[in-house]
Image: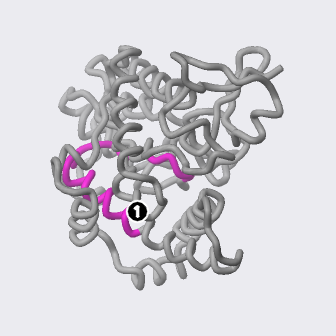
């Protein structure tokens, strides 16, 4: 696909369709400054990527890295398997693709690029829990008949190799160096904010650390660089496997970025995801994500198929 600056402008009908598709995503945009103006024209990269599909009447492909595994912190989540937060989020993604089909008949699909194994050793989650989470995610998609969604993970690329070997291969081929990331953070606020957000999550999610608070913070800062490296590596592998796709992100993204930040469910924090929180059903039917410890104070725990699912607010 030619670089953005050298590609010819899309035909008017194609441009209108791309704008209509992007307009469906904008109300759900995850942004560091969510109230700042962000018209369709502020996203030329996404419009260009969409045009690559629309000009040929091809189904649009979105890739969304995320849905890795549940946080290991029992203060945040209900267990290590997907629950109502994931179910609602998957349903939202499927409906978003269905909405695209209503304005663009060839339709769209979203490939959920489940990245748990890429980070498993760094976030200190057992690989067996990551496998169980990804398998249940795929089963949930089948049960709910979410026909616009599929799951992609390291098993699709590297099969049954040992998890540590898979991580090492992807890291060696695609990851930037720590020095390159440090240099980038000195000039790019978004990368610095992401590093700080990852450090905060690692600090909150670490269970059973026996050292001092300052030692924990040093450990998490080091691991945060590793998470950033692996995140870039995973992005490189996804781009290689899905070269035409429109890249979505669960992290806040500014207008004009290569990725489009997408909010899955309402939450008090722009960084909160279903795998770092529990779902709460509010009065009036609204759903919200929050830490399990906070959710427990609001209402009762609800089971689905015998497993903890969500909280019903009193």
In magenta segment, residue 249 = yes
Q: Say above or below: 18 vs 101.
A: below
Q: According to the image, label 1 marks what residue?
A: 121
Indicate the quadrant containing the C terminus: top left, top right, bottom left or bottom right. top right
Figure quadrant of residue 51: top left
Residue 131 position, x and y percent, is: 34, 42
Q: Secondary structure at mark 1?
A: helix
Q: Residue at (50%, 25%) from the top-left corner?
A: 87
Q: How many marks?
A: 1
Q: Residue at (57%, 30%) from the top-left corner?
A: 85
20 vs 253, left or right, is: left
Q: Say above or below: 82 vs 113.
A: above
In magenta segment, residue 126 = no
Q: Residue at (53%, 53%) from the top-left corner?
A: 253
Residue 176 position, x and y percent, is: 33, 75
104 vs 266, left or right, is: left
Residue 194 position, x and y percent, is: 55, 63
The crowd level at tag 1 (other Cα within 10 Å; few <14, some 14-19, many 20+) is some
Query: How was the colour assigned to the protein in this rendering?
Result: one colour
Name the residue nearer the viewer: 214 or 200: 214
Residue 152 position, x and y percent, is: 28, 40
Name the residue nearer the viewer: 288 or 138: 138
Q: Say above or below: 283 vs 267.
A: above
41 vs 61, left or right, is: right
Magenta stretch?
A: 229-252
Name the residue nearer the viewer: 304 or 27: 304
Figure quadrant of residue 221: bottom right
Q: Is residue 167 in view?
A: yes
Q: Residue at (41%, 15%) from the top-left corner?
A: 144
Q: Is residue 248 in view?
A: no
């Amino acid at each position: 696909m030619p670089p953005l600056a050298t590609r010819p402008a899309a035909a008017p009908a194609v441009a209108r369709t791309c704008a209509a598709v992007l307009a469906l995503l904008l109300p759900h945009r995850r942004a560091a400054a969510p109230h700042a103006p962000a018209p369709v024209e502020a996203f030329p990269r996404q419009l260009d990527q969409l045009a690559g599909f629309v000009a040929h009447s091809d189904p649009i492909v979105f890739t969304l890295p995320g849905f890795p595994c549940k946080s290991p912190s029992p203060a945040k989540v209900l267990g290590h398997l997907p629950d109502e937060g994931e179910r609602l989020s998957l349903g939202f993604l499927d409906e978003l693709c269905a909405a695209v089909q209503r304005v663009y008949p060839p339709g769209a699909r979203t490939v959920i690029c489940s990245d748990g194994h890429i980070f498993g050793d760094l976030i200190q989650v057992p690989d067996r829990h990551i496998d169980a989470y990804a398998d249940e995610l795929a089963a949930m998609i089948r049960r709910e008949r979410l026909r616009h969604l599929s799951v992609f993970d390291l098993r699709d690329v590297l099969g049954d190799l040992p998890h540590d070997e898979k991580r090492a291969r992807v890291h060696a081929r695609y990851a930037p160096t720590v020095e390159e990331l440090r240099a980038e953070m000195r000039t790019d606020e978004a990368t610095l904010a992401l590093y700080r957000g990852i450090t905060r999550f690692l600090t909150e999610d670490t269970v059973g650390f026996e050292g001092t608070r300052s030692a924990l913070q040093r450990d998490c800062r080091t691991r945060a660089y590793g998470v950033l490296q692996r995140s870039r590596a995973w992005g490189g592998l996804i781009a290689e496997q899905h070269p035409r796709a429109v890249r979505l992100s669960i992290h806040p993204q500014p207008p004009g970025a290569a990725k489009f930040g997408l909010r899955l469910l309402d939450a008090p924090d722009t960084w909160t995801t279903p795998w770092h929180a529990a779902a709460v059903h509010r009065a009036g039917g609204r759903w919200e994500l929050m830490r399990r410890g906070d959710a427990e104070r609001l209402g009762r725990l609800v089971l689905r198929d015998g497993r903890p699912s969500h909280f019903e607010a009193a």
